[in-house]
Amino acid sequence: MAHLHTPLPSGDGMGGERIHAEAHVAFGGDDTHLWFGVNYLAGVTDLDAIVAVEALGVFVIEVKGVPLSEIEHYGQGSCRIRNRPGTKTPLQQALKGQQRLVQFLRSSSGMKHIPFVHVTAAFPRIRRSDFVSKWAHPGVIAQAKSMIFEEDLQSAEALRAVLISVIDHPPIGGGEDRRFPLTASAIQSIASAISPDDAVGPTSNDVERMRVVEQSLNKTRRQYVQPVDGTGIQEVLFSGPPGTGKTFRLLEIALGHARAGRNVVLACHNKVLASELRRMLLADVVTGDRSENLDVLDVHQLLERYPNVSGDHESASGFDGWVFAKVRRLIRDQQPTERFSTVLVDEAQDVEDWMYELLRWSSDPDAEWFVAEGRGQALYRDAPAPWLTAYKSRVESAKRAHRMQRVYRSGKADHLVARCTHEVSPSLDGITDFVARHPVVEDQLTLDLGGEEFDRLGEPPAFANLPGLPDELTVAEYRDGMVRAYARLITEELELLERLGSPGDLAILVPKPHAHQQRGNSGDYVAQRVIHALELVGCPYIDQVDNEARRSLRPEGAVRLVTYHSSRGVEASRVLILGFEELGRSMGGPLARQRNLAYVTLTRAKFGCRLAVSASRTGPHLDFVQAAAGAVRRELELAESQAKTDPEPIPDQVDWEEGEVVRYVADRGFGFIACMDREVFFHLSNVFGVLDADIAPGLRVCFASGMQDGKERATFVASAQPAGLQEPPLQDHSAALVAELIGDRGFGFALSPVHGRVLMHKSVLHVAVDALTVGMRVDIKVESGADGRIRATDAVLR
């Protein structure tokens, strides 16, 4: 009896898949293992069937349970089935599934050798003779000999014979160069890797983030979410500092294009980031609209899909030279197994020319390209690659370059320390002048460094002193002392995360291992001590310092251990930074790269980071960050002592006025409303219920206004006076409407005609966060913080 590892397909709407599955169950022996409807693995969208037969092989099978009359067209390269989207043949779909399954096994199974995975398709309601009679092309006839049809599902002998034919005469792609019998232990390893019971699912943060992406997909201002049609090549560039949502913007576009039926790839440099995005996309199963046309890869994974191509070691100069030669040979000798019609590239600042050439070769000639560049975040290059320089020139000439300025991840204070480090470190003399030129509390919305906007003030990095251990300790005693110290810091961070409502969302960042310090693939001595500390604390963790685990998925609640370099693009609620004293001493490269690495490392946290400091070990950049954080903290304390904490008296009624938009700067989000004999400034963040695309000169609006810094500004702008604000508020409260739902960071925004845009944390609500909807009436009590920002201290739904 065959081993069934998943439920059988239901007969409802999938009768053909059920027929196919029942035949494998009935005719498979004890050496056969079966999986059906595999859609729970990261990066593996939907495999109809996986069949593993000991001593025979592993098969990925795409099942089409339709009768012959439903197939309107079938060729070697295209297939059209009535009332179904897409034109890929089932063999092409199976090959795509095979590539994704192998990619998953390489990154998640820990198997030393991945068995060859064979590919075929099944038509359980069609006879082979009828199929080849209708589609009599020689290539289709040859493929049909190694596809599964109705008569192959009538006996064990017939089913085994067609599987052997798949091995001997692959209907698509190539076969094994050398055949190795599939062993029982290999099947067991596969079963463990793809078990639905052990599969890593999306985290609660992933689900929340995907909801945000879904909301953004529905906004008309996302002009790039829908692909162009017949207008030729479109190239777009997004750039901005860390935490401005560049990766999320690419993800939104990728999903929009994939759902429009395009073949999409989102590629990046960082293996850890790619694994994060693949796990996040599992949450699309929760939303019910997971796309099968989207691949998320680190660029090396795309090259790994062509394992039989070798580079010229003798003529190559270094790794990049060797791999570039390999890519050129691939382009010269082969055709891509599939072509992408939309290409999205993240972390472009470190994408080499060979990576770009590989993506260009894998894409359609008229593919749309969307590229994100993190300014000041290049970790492996001192200057942009030639492809990126040329790309930016074309995009800027076409006016398709967009700078993203709103920082969603970090607060203003911690970002200021990171920027100061990036621009000035390690010169301590420059800190005072930098902080004076960029005051952290002068304007709660922006920093004049580049116009960045922030949702909150935040706080500068904190520091934890490691114990001074006696010199006479043995190596083992010193190691144990450091392990206990690390365990104490980890415990403190985990307790803080519990209070923040983000249990386990901790990233521990350590230096990249040096070649002489590596022990196997587990990283250097700092990482080893952290692992011992995590085991001492007893919390789940994932070690992504280990190169073999960088593509593995982080489970819910597991602490992440990762290098500074591999943390780029990744975020966590809290971040603990160890070994920062090594930056500028034994690691980092040229000064510009050291600064970039410090900038990346200091901008990973949503709710603050902490650096471990040893009295016996200092470093130029660690000393600088301590001094810069101290300078910013003194500015905050001074502002706090001088701040006016009592808000202005709440007016008895709000004066609503009517006016007309006379100017609007769309890319900056502000404009002016003409009313009687004056013009009133307004910002997009204070507009409610009006689509971005509709804001233009001539638009009639209703608005309330107030004074800020001695100037009149619109506090609430709408097409008409909102009915929900007409009832008087509770005593000592102001009436407002929910403008932005509370997200995974724990805060959202209300819009009040008295106070304008008000930060609203989930802790001030009297109801569950899920009870909120945009436009809901909420009465708020507010206070003004040291940064001048208005925050809700109480929020009551009406």
Image (cartoon, grey):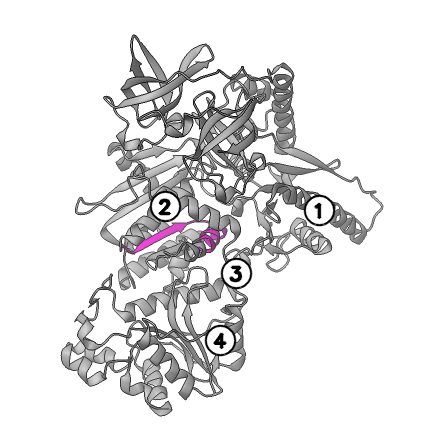
Q: CA gap, disc 3 to disc 4?
A: 17 Å
Q: CA gap, disc 2 to disc 4?
A: 34 Å
State the residue at coordinates (42%, 18%).
654
Q: Identify the mark nearer the N-term, 4 or 1.
A: 4
Q: Nearer the viewer, residue 445 or 12?
A: 12
Q: Identify the mark nearer the N-term, 2 or 4.
A: 4
State the residue at coordinates (39%, 82%).
22
Q: Identify the mark nearer the N-term, 3 or 1.
A: 3
Q: Is residue 749 visible in this depiction of the protein?
A: yes
Q: Quadrant of residue 464?
A: top right
Q: Quadrant of residue 577?
A: top right
| Callout 4 secondary element | loop
According to the image, label 2 marks what residue? 252
Residue type beneath disc 4: His
- Specify whether 215 is left or right of 199: left
Q: Identify the mark nearer the N-term, 1 or 2.
A: 2
Q: Residues within 10 Å of mark 4 (few under 14, many from 20)?
A: some
Tag of residue 491: 1
According to the image, label 3 marks what residue? 200
Instruction: Give x and y (percent) for residue 549.
Output: 54, 58
Whether residue 273 appears in magenta in the rendering, the answer is yes
According to the image, label 4 marks what residue? 5
The magenta span reads: 262-280
Instruction: Give x and y (percent) for residue 114.
Output: 47, 71
- Against 628, is 650 above or below? above
